Amino acid sequence: MRSLPALTSLRVFETTGKCLSFTQAATQLHVTQSAVSRQIKQLEDYLGVALFIRRHHHLELTESGKQLLAKLEQSFNLMESAVQELRDPKQRQKLALLVPPTFATRWLAPRLANLHRHSPELELSIHNSDVDSKLFDCCIRFGRTARPSHYSELIMLEQHVAVCAPELVDRAQHLEQAAGSLLHILHKGERLPVWQNWLQAAGLTDQVDASRGMEFSTLDQVTNAAINGAGFAIIDKHMINRELQSGALVPFSDVEVSGPYGYWLDINAERQGLAKVIRFTEWLRAISPD
């Protein structure tokens, strides 16, 4: 048996804690003010701590009250989602997904047919604007480490290869003379150190000036520039499979560098148990990143 106070008392406390008024809570719950006050008193007696500081014209949460309210909001949200899934088949099947634009276009989109075969009941709603990650069932994030207070699982590390248009392969053998044609990717306003990491792995740090070249705000821009012969790029090969297979881009070195950035699946605690989230997670684990 779970050692819990009455669910009614917890629900009354959550409502009162949000509006900080017995009167407003009573109105929202369609009960009397004295009933709200009584439920709060019973909960405080059960817990042995004060949840509110009662001022003359308003209420304030104590530290214990703040702690309990935060946990209850998560719990009630999870309960609401679980019930809504059963009541609304469309909501049960619709998976709201926050994904970086490049990942969505270059990795996820070509695999959506595979996802449909694996889980035909899922209907994705894909977004790339991070208004509030709590609004999404799952988030795929570009980063280096797990996200605090979330379930975080690494989907794949970047695998960087050196590429260019076919007509530039001969020039790539003298990269030190073509440093002005290095193509750089920006992340949060700064260049990702992919060129520095690759040059170090290739033993060319002293020969090639990685500070030179052009910079772009998205990987798609870098890829298109490279395809059109604008210069040389270090790109995660998972994102340019199509270009490598077609010959639009060709490697000019055998050196490859893993990480340190990758793509992570982040799930808020209150979403982890949802069937649609579990199905999507299973598919991500099973499918090859290449």
Image: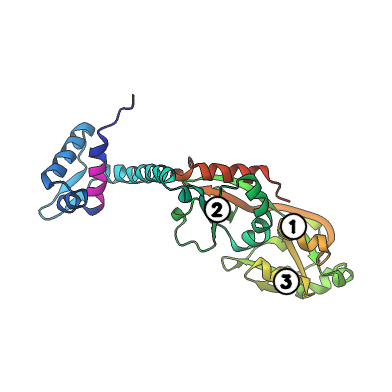
Tell me which segment is drawn in magenta: 11-18
Q: CA distance from mark 3 to mark 1?
A: 14 Å
Percent of width and height locating residue 118: 64, 45
* Quadrant in the rendering for residue 164: bottom right
Earlier-in-chain disc, 3 versus 2: 2
Name the residue type under label 3: Asn
Q: CA distance from mark 3 to mark 2?
A: 31 Å
Q: The residue tagged with tag 3: helix, strand or loop?
A: helix
Earlier-in-chain disc, 2 versus 1: 2
Q: Is residue 204 visible in this depiction of the protein?
A: no
Q: Nearer the viewer, mark 3 or mark 2?
A: 2
- Taking the spot 51% from the left edge, 64% from the top edge, the residue there is 129
The answer to whether 78 is drawn above or below residue 173 in the figure is above
Q: Tell me if mark 1 has few (under 14), some (14-19) or many (20+) residues whose alpha carbon lies within 10 angstroms of its own.
A: some
- Taking the spot 15% from the left edge, 54% from the top edge, the residue there is 58
Q: CA distance from mark 2 to mark 1?
A: 28 Å
Evaluate if marks 2 and 1 touch, with contact meaning CB atoms under 8 Å apart.
Answer: no
Q: Nearer the viewer, mark 2 or mark 1?
A: 2
Earlier-in-chain disc, 3 versus 1: 3
- Work out which quarter of the rendered image holds the N terminus and state it: top left
Question: Relative to 169, is 17 on the left or the right?
Answer: left
Q: The residue tagged with tag 2: helix, strand or loop?
A: strand
Residue occupied by mark 2 = 123
State yes or no: residue 16 in magenta. Answer: yes
Residue occupied by mark 1 = 237
Q: Is residue 221 visible in this depiction of the protein?
A: yes
Q: Which mark is residue 224?
A: 3
* Quadrant in the rendering for residue 51: top left
Q: The residue tagged with tag 1: helix, strand or loop?
A: helix
Percent of width and height locating residue 108: 64, 56
Q: Tell me if mark 2 has few (under 14), some (14-19) or many (20+) residues whose alpha carbon lies within 10 angstroms of its own.
A: some
State yes or no: residue 25 in magenta. Answer: no
